[in-house]
Amino acid sequence: YGEARVRLMLGGAVLGGAVGLTATTELAALLAVIGAVAGWRALPWAVKRRSCRRAEAMECDLSEMLDVVALGMRSGMSFDRSLDLYTGYFRTQLADAFRSAQRQWACARWSENIVRSLRFGATMADNLEDAAREARSGYKARRQEAVAKAPVKMMVPTGVLILPAMLMLVLGPVLLELAGGF
């Protein structure tokens, strides 16, 4: 950050001096000082501006996130699973921030289990078995969710491909008789 500020300051001074040299040396010195000050202040201004934009975007998405998590928890999901639902289906800055936080929580759980095993003399195998059981249950829940969504996804191909063929098979002879009668 400090190095970037110094480089921007020097770049602003050089640019201001170069522009000022087209007229007079006094103007070059003045523009070099103005360019150096502008370069020095540019990075904090840009960081503050980006921070404000990010805060506004997250504030805008906060109510939606709270609704999704509350709905998930009312339907019987845990907080982690409800938050995972939000971060899996929404592509916002807030969802990205929560996705990153969830990864950190998962790493912290692993570290906590290892430290607990080492500190209290519990076997690491028990902790790993518990983690494997939890991973299997999470995998099973995701697979069950995918299986539950399959009939809905199959409705479109069925309606577009199979239904017209069945209609032609059933109504074909009737239509041929009608066409032959004219």
Image (cartoon, grey):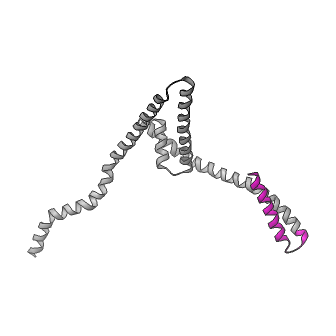
Q: Is residue 19 magenta?
A: yes
Compared with residue 48, is residue 104 higher up or lower down, i.e. above or below? above
Residue located 37% across and 40% down the image: 140
Comparing 155 with 64, the one in front is: 155
Image quarter where the C terminus lies is bottom left
Q: Which residue is depicted at the point 30% across and 50% down?
A: 151
Main secondary structure of the magenta stretch: helix
Q: Which residues are magenta?
A: 1-27
The residue sitting at the bottom extreme is 182
Q: Position of residue 158 (x, y in %)?
A: 27, 57
- Please state if 33 lies on the left or on the right of 164 as rendered: right
x%, y% of residue 36? 82, 60
Count the marks: 0
Residue at point 56%, 42% (across, down) = 101
| Residue 122 as seen in the image, left or right of residue 141 | right
Q: Is residue 123 left or right of residue 3?
A: left
- On the image, the x and y values in percent for residue 122 come to 51, 24
Apparent side of residue 120 relative to residue 72 in the rendered image (left or right) = right
- Vertical order, 74 against 4 (above or below): above
Q: Residue at x 53, y 27 (%)?
A: 117
Magenta residue check for 31: no
| Position above or below: 78 against 19 | above
Residue at the right extreme, as displayed: 26
In the image, residue 132 sits, relative to residue 86, either above or below, namely: above
Q: Nearer the viewer, residue 50 or 133?
A: 133
Task: List x then y, in percent, for residue 84.
Answer: 48, 42
